[in-house]
Amino acid sequence: MDLRDYIRILHKNWMLIVASTLIGVAFAAIGAIASTPRYDATSELYVSVRSAGDGTTSDLVQGTSFARQAVTSYVSIANSSRVLQPVIDELGLDVTPQQLAGRVSATSPLNTVLIEITASDDEPAAAAALANAVGRSLSNIVVNELERPEGEGASPVSVQTVQDAVAPTRPSSPNVPLNIALGLLIGLGVGIGLAALRTVLDTRIHSTHDIAQVTDAPIIGRINYDPEAKKRPLVVHVDPRNPRAEAFRALRTNLQFLNVEGGPRSFVVTSSIPGEGKSTTACNLAISLADTGARVALVDGDLRLPRVAHYMGIEGGVGLTDVLIGRAELADVIQRWGRAALYVLPSGRIPPNPSELLGSTAMVNLLATLTAEFDYVIVDAPPLLLVTDAAVISKFTGGAMLAAASGRTKKAEISGSSSVLESIGSRLVGVIVTMLPSKGPDSYGYGVYGYGDISSVEPDTTRRTKTRRAAVMEQP
């Protein structure tokens, strides 16, 4: 993955990341508000050692060195039971020395003879009183017990309070700004992690970038998602300036360039699974090709769930199956559609043996006849991964075009469809990505470009959508 891939992940999942960040901030703020404020108060002690000599510089240095070494031990015993029990008795606290030890700490700045006693409590005044009491108790224990020489001599160690603890004005915890900052960072990290995990676990294709990872076939079409597609599947004539209509015209142009070296101009339009828009793609592509002046034959080769006759608004009771079994002639069942030279061959009645019919010699001869009579032959076929019909037909044509729906088709399904065609020696002409979002990192859209009134370019578009049913196919 390169930098662009990471940017796409962040762009695609920005709502998840923002939501996770806000949740982290909210939890941190709620936790800070709900927690009981704690106040810290600190007293400071100074440790010195009286010299037994004549007070020379050497004696002072030795005394200071001893004091620095002794401070480390004094810090360690500051929250011991021996120091804290007198504090409990003095302040009348209802706790044990072990419980009180969790509220008291002692530190010594590096290379100093200072001891800082910090006490914590729910009340500011109580925290200050506790810190001062611990300082007095530690001083008493050190001077009068631990460092007192045998006999009644004075202790050489002196521990004096140089700064009494005062009641704090602000709580030491919770630190609301710090907690919110930590909540923001944790929430942001969790959001980015979830976005990355979601991307790894999501095996569906969402853009042409995802398709390029699983197949070398070119992307020959990018069809935008249209919520009105079910109501108006044939958008090329109904709304010629619609971005989806422009996408089909772009597909038409790409298909024309695919045959610059010659070869049969007959193609199968299929998909990996149902519901990827293959039938509407086949119909709109055929209409777009016919608009260029080419003679186009649209064949409904889906003998299991035919849709072409319904979309094109023609009678589909008699059609391909009748021609294949010899019950009808091609010229008697193929129907002209619209003003252009577009002819539609519906599926006819659904047979019990679709695969056998589509793989028969009669189908080979029919496709050969259509290829000779028309500039383009477009065959709508069933999904590749469910039945073998599309793979069988593709062997008799110039190749298959695979429709793949953004957000629906899985990468493994595209890879599987490509493998099916490759295993039988058929050609995958290209992939048509359907249902692409119009916004976001996976979007791909066409704008509207033109001058003046569209009616001067496409006159009487309403009448062009009406179906003209002709029973006889015109000769070229």
Image: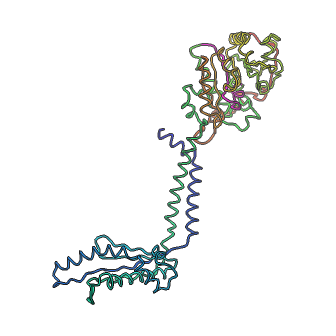
Q: Magenta includes 459?
A: no
Residue under the image location 55 percent in, 67 percent down: 32
Q: Magenta includes 277?
A: yes
Q: Nearer the viewer, residue 13 or 50?
A: 50
Residue under the image location 54 percent in, 52 percent down: 190
Rendering coords of residue 198 (x, y %): 58, 44
Residue under the image location 82 percent in, 21 percent down: 316
Q: Nearer the viewer, residue 432 or 243?
A: 432
Q: Is residue 201 above or below residue 166?
A: above
Q: Is residue 465 left or right of residue 409?
A: right
Colouring scheme, one of rainbow, by chain, secondary structure, one colour: rainbow
| Res 468 → quadrant | top right
Rendering coords of residue 471 (x, y %): 82, 15
| Res 218 → quadrant | top right
Q: Is residue 322 left or right of residue 181?
A: right
Residue under the image location 29 percent in, 82 percent down: 147
| Res 424 → quadrant | top right
Rendering coords of residue 287 (x, y %): 71, 23
Residue, far front: 151
Q: Is residue 126 left or right of residue 33?
A: left
The residue range painted magenta reads 263-282
Rendering coords of residue 151 (x, y %): 27, 88
Q: Is residue 340 visible?
A: no
Residue, far bottom: 152
Q: Is residue 408 above or below residue 330?
A: below
Q: Is residue 358 visible?
A: yes
Q: Nearer the viewer, residue 15 or 249?
A: 15
Q: Quadrant of the C terminus?
A: top right
